Amino acid sequence: MTHFRKYKAAVITGPRKPIELWEYDYIDPPAGCITIAVVRAGVCGTDLHLWQGDDSSSNSNSSSDDARDIEPFILGHEGLGRILALGEGVSTDHSGTPVSINDIVYWNPIRPCHACYECTIQRDLTGCQNGTFVSPARNTVSWASYTQVATLQRNNNFYRVDAANVPLDAFIALGCALPTMLKGLENKGPIHRGEAVLVQGCGAVGLAAIFLAKIAGARAIICIEGNAERRRMAERFGATEVLDMRGAEYETVEARGRRIREIVGARGVELAIECSGHAAAVEEGLALLGRNARYLLVGTWAGARTVALSPFETVHKALKIIGTTYASPENYYQAARLVEAHFREFPFADCVTHRFPLGQVAEALQTVAAGAAVKVVIEPQAE
Ligand SMILES: [Zn+2]
Ligand SMILES: [Zn+2]
């Protein structure tokens, strides 16, 4: 049993419109489902694009047309919840680990359909066109995370986490970013021991890249970032050189390029990971790539800007340029296990720089828009 009879969720009713709190009746979970009290919801840059109505992803159900009526929706695709009730037939999480009331789970609000070409033929759940980043607000239940209570459906994969020993903030800190980076490395191939890695942008996605490069044994991890707080965090995660693109010394592409070549040597960058979401960064990255280099593009979730690409350079240098989108359920499981294994050496929990109650989702999104935060979280149970 739970003390919830009613609960609230934050609802988006249109691009940039004030965010409304809607009230729902608590209902017990149907067979095969569970209900959870959401204790942390991570705010991701993608949420900001969805609120603003940017055409940010094929999984988006929003539009760039501000005048268009939209179906109201609940945001949030990063969440930790405490189990309130288990529906009939549920005794384990989706890895087979037994679960009980009050356990904390980390879940994937995006539900692959397991019934489309991408899911079943290509076997790439991140390509599923039927999963969405949001939960329709007119439903009687939500599986997104900007809510006090969520009802996880059969295809919302969820995994128990070790909340007795690991701070909740450590799990939410890299939100969807760590699973996404794990998926990216599946697509691109692993970071090799002794490799030099260039990471462009040190928000959550960039920090996940630094973390994975560090535990892979990279010899150098060079980062480009303009935000001082993120630069400090990049260093704490193990970056060996962090170039301040807003400081006098490295404000130009040329100055940064000179320094990066000094570090990696004349061969150029062998591995670069674009985590900033800025098209200009992609241009900068392409110019730095050496022969046989691999370039992983992961940071761009909105925008129509294009960049110039030299087909000759790409062929001549045998470049591998790979785009990767979001994460598969197993990447959530892996991310939780990595956080549990490494939370003492890496400052995951300290990445949470801003917290807001459910009634201040707009302020939370504006904080992300201002670019001042490392990680913003919503605490739906806070007043
Ligand atoms: Zn995200
Ligand atoms: Zn599908």
Image: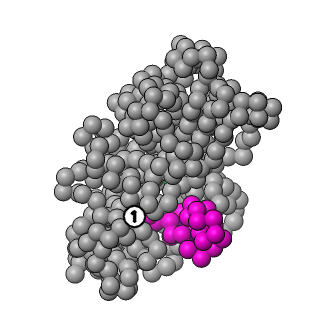
From the image, which quarter does the N terminus lie in?
A: bottom left
Would you say 168 lies left or right of 274 here? left
Is residue 297 at least partly visible in the picture? yes
What residue is pinned by disc 1? 107
Residue 275, above or below 228: below
Residue drawn at 50 percent across, 73 percent down: 137
Q: Give the image location of residue 45, x and y in percent.
A: 52, 48
Would you say 23 lies left or right of 323 here? left
Q: Of the residues shown, which amino acid type is indicated by label 1?
A: Trp
Residue 360, above or below 199: below
Q: How many marks?
A: 1
Is residue 248 at least partly visible in the picture? no
Q: Residues within 10 Å of mark 1 (few under 14, many from 20)?
A: many
Q: Give the image location of residue 249, x and y in percent.
A: 53, 13
- Is residue 317 shown in magenta? no
Front position in the image: 381 or 350? 350
Residue drawn at 57 percent across, 57 percent down: 50
The magenta span reads 108-135
- Is residue 121 shown in magenta? yes
- Quadrant assignment, res 229: top left
Q: Give the image location of residue 291, x and y in percent.
A: 67, 28
Residue drawn at 56 percent across, 33 percent down: 271
